[in-house]
Image (cartoon, rainbow, N blue to C red):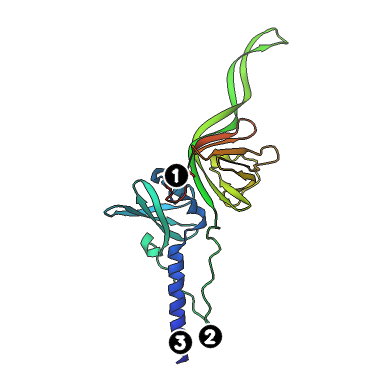
Amino acid sequence: MVMRIAIALVSLSALMWAQYGQAQVPRDIVDLVGARAAGGETQLRARGYDYVRGQTGDDRVWTYWWNPRTQVCITVSTVEGRYEAITASPSPDCNQAQAQPATLPDGPVRPAPVPSDMAPAFDLGLICFGEGQRPQLATKYGYTWNEKEARYTYGNRTELTSQDFDASVSIQLFEGGGRIRLPKKLIPPLNSRGEDGWWKLDSVVTTRDTITAQYRLNGLNKPKLTIDRRSGRISIRGASNYGFTGTCDTVGNEQRRF
């Protein structure tokens, strides 16, 4: 009788864990729900996920992605060009062997622990696509005026210039603050090292029409961001030509900007 109860509890715990895992979105990609499929695929690859396979239904497309570092398989449901849902899936869905459950010791059966990599709750999630700009050193060749020789001489010189590129940023706002995920191109060599690609947002001020905040890249560069909630436009400005402009979409199925 005791053995049957133990087996039943183990089965129930495994079922609850499986359902929990299916319903949750890994923390590193939760902000992609509601994003455009084209940009979402770029972000998935940038965050370590490899495309495995896909299948087409009547009104949606399912794609399966595997992260070899975290050993996580996900299923992405795309409807009308946007990521409608992202869910954790069993490893075999990504053509990977199913992990074997550990042998349980004798004694009371406890529920499976809650994973630590699930996303924190946030009130507003945004993914913003646009163009970025960062400073860089460039070597240029040409003629310059040589005061000592009182003539033009040919040579090279190093100048501080700016580099333009396409990029996307993700933002999560919650009570008391927020955080921003930056692409590698917006992270200078000297930085404060964000947490898993996320930087804490400070001085967050949210009004009916705008959102303002700033984050600290290093001691000399603390970019400020401004978001127009009516148009969805975002502007980030920092030191030495560091910046980003683009348009933000809400994470989820809302039918307005935000």
How dense is the environment of label 1, judged by Cα within 10 Å: few (below 14), some, or many (20 and up)?
few
Q: Is residue 139 above or below residue 117?
A: above
Q: Which residue is mark 3?
A: 5
Q: Nearer the viewer, mark 1 or mark 2?
A: 1
Residue 256 position within the rendered picture, expressed as x and y whole percent measured from the top left: 44, 44
As helix, strand or loop, the secondary structure at mark 3 comes to helix
* Residue drawn at 55 percent across, 57 percent down: 121
Residue 67 in the image, given as x and y percentages of width and height: 46, 56
Q: Between disc 1 and disc 3, whose residue precedes?
A: 3
In the picture as drawn, the residue positioned furthest to the top comes out as: 150
Tag 2: amino acid:
Asp
Q: Is residue 3 above or below residue 128?
A: below
* Near-viewer residue (189 or 29): 29
Task: Identify the residue at image location x=47%, y=90%.
Answer: 2
Query: Rounded to the nearest whole Å, what is the CA distance between mark 1 and mark 2?
Result: 54 Å
Frontmost of labels 1 and 3 is 1
Instruction: State whether residue 126 appears in this view.
Output: yes
Q: Say what secondary structure mark 1 lies in.
A: loop
Residue at 60% in and 49% down: 178
Q: Which residue is mark 2?
A: 106
Q: Position of residue 199 (x, y in %)?
A: 61, 47
Packing grade of label 3 (10 A; few <14, some 14-19, many >=20) is few
Determine whether, in the image, residue 241 is placed left or right of residue 48: right
Q: Is residue 132 above or below residue 126?
A: above
